[in-house]
Image: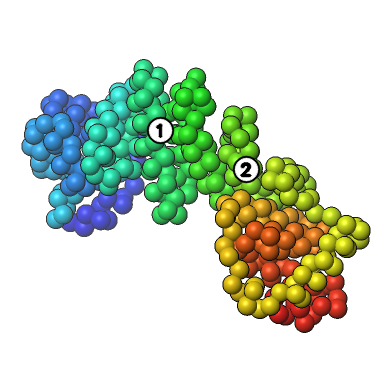
Amino acid sequence: WDLEKISSVELPESVVELLIEEMQTLSRNLKNSLRVVSCIGSRVTKQTLDVLVSALGQNLTAALEDLVKRGYLVQDKSSEVRFSHDKVQESAYETMVVAEQRMLHKKLGQLMFEKVVHDETLLFLAATQINLGGIDASFDRRKRVDIATLNQKAGNRAKDMSSFDVALQFFQNGILWVPVESGWSLDYDISLALHQSAVETACLLNNVEVVTELTTNVTANARNGTDNQACLFCLVKSLATCGQLEDSKNIAFVILEQLGEVVPREKGDPGFTMDFKSMVTALKGLSDDAILSMRATHQSERDDLSLSVYLILAYIYTEISPKHIPDVALQMLRITLNNGLSAVSPQAFASFAVTLVSMGGQDGLAWRI
């Protein structure tokens, strides 16, 4: 028998109906055990089985052994249990109505949730099972916030693994678990963290609709501009990526104004001309050692955000108004020289060097910086 080939064979829907009928004839214990495994997934690790056996009782072990003998399940050398075919899992799951499925997911999720405190390897499983059980308004506020926090942790872990679609689902479920009536008042920190994480992840997926919707929520409820700015910046990036350059530019202006920074001027603007000449003079007066020994900024998050907004504007202006680009580079270097070095400062120096060449007459200074 080639079990791998057998498990990959497509079975007709009528087979599922026959399997469901057959499963309904099993003893209550066997049928319940099949349902538990079907809720977990196509395969269940030994670690998860140990948790289930401990929580649900020793009769689960005997039931699983019986189900292996009957051909519903296959036990690997690692003691991992899997269904003999995807249709067998589907059939076992469909022996329950939707309400029963949700109830069992909820029960399993709560069991796993209690274990996550001591074993974070169960994090994804616990969050997934609780979410599949649906939002339960009967849970008290504290428990709902704890589940929201669980989703935040699972989303962060998935994001670290570059599984952005999965991460976004966890963040969005976390938002739903926070009670609406207290989310932005009593549970502000977790509400903000979930929204910001979801916005950042949706931005990575170029999902401008989710970014826009959640940023609107944050804008309406943020206690200060700082809490709102990270989401607005993600919206700027998403809109720019989707080609909505004017909208992206306008929101970038809002962030700059909140930060007290300058909205870029055209190359022929008298104020720009004067500031540009002053910057050239200042750079000529700085030695190489002075530049190389610059201190780090004491407000790195703020300066990184400001410089990053200007970088996005440089991209936007490349498409719609190149005559604004020199002032973008000027403002980036001004922030760096005034406040100190941040992670984006090298791009500030490089951008201004390009501007010096494009303006003409300062190639030597451009090469130096």
Identify the residue at image location x=75%, y=72%: 283
Up the image or down, 8 lies above or below 211; here it is below
Q: CA distance from mark 1 to mark 2?
A: 23 Å
The residue tagged with tag 1: helix, strand or loop? helix
Identify the residue at image location x=23%, y=28%: 21
Q: Position of residue 140 (x, y in %)?
A: 36, 20
Nearest the camera: 35 or 339?
A: 339
Hey, which quadrant is residue 152 in on the image? top left
Which residue of the protein is positioned furthest toward the bottom in this rendering?
364
Q: Position of residue 12 (x, y in %)?
A: 34, 40
Q: Amino acid at mark 1?
A: Ala
Nearest the camera: 14 or 324?
A: 324
Q: Nearer the viewer, mark 1 or mark 2?
A: 2
Identify the residue at image location x=24%, y=44%: 119
Q: Position of residue 81 (x, y in %)?
A: 19, 46
Which residue of the protein is positioned furthest toward the top in this rendering?
138
Q: Earlier in the sequence, mark 1 or mark 2?
A: 1
Q: Can residue 367 be seen in the rendering of this structure?
A: yes
Q: Amino acid at mark 2?
A: Gln
Up the image or down, 350 lies above or below 223; here it is below
On the image, numbered disc 2 is attached to which residue?
229
Looking at the figure, which quarter contains the C terminus?
bottom right
Q: Position of residue 96 (x, y in %)?
A: 29, 26
Q: Residues within 10 Å of mark 2 (few under 14, many from 20)?
A: many
The residue tagged with tag 2: helix, strand or loop? helix
Q: Determine which of the numbered discs, if any, sits on residue 148 in the image.
A: 1
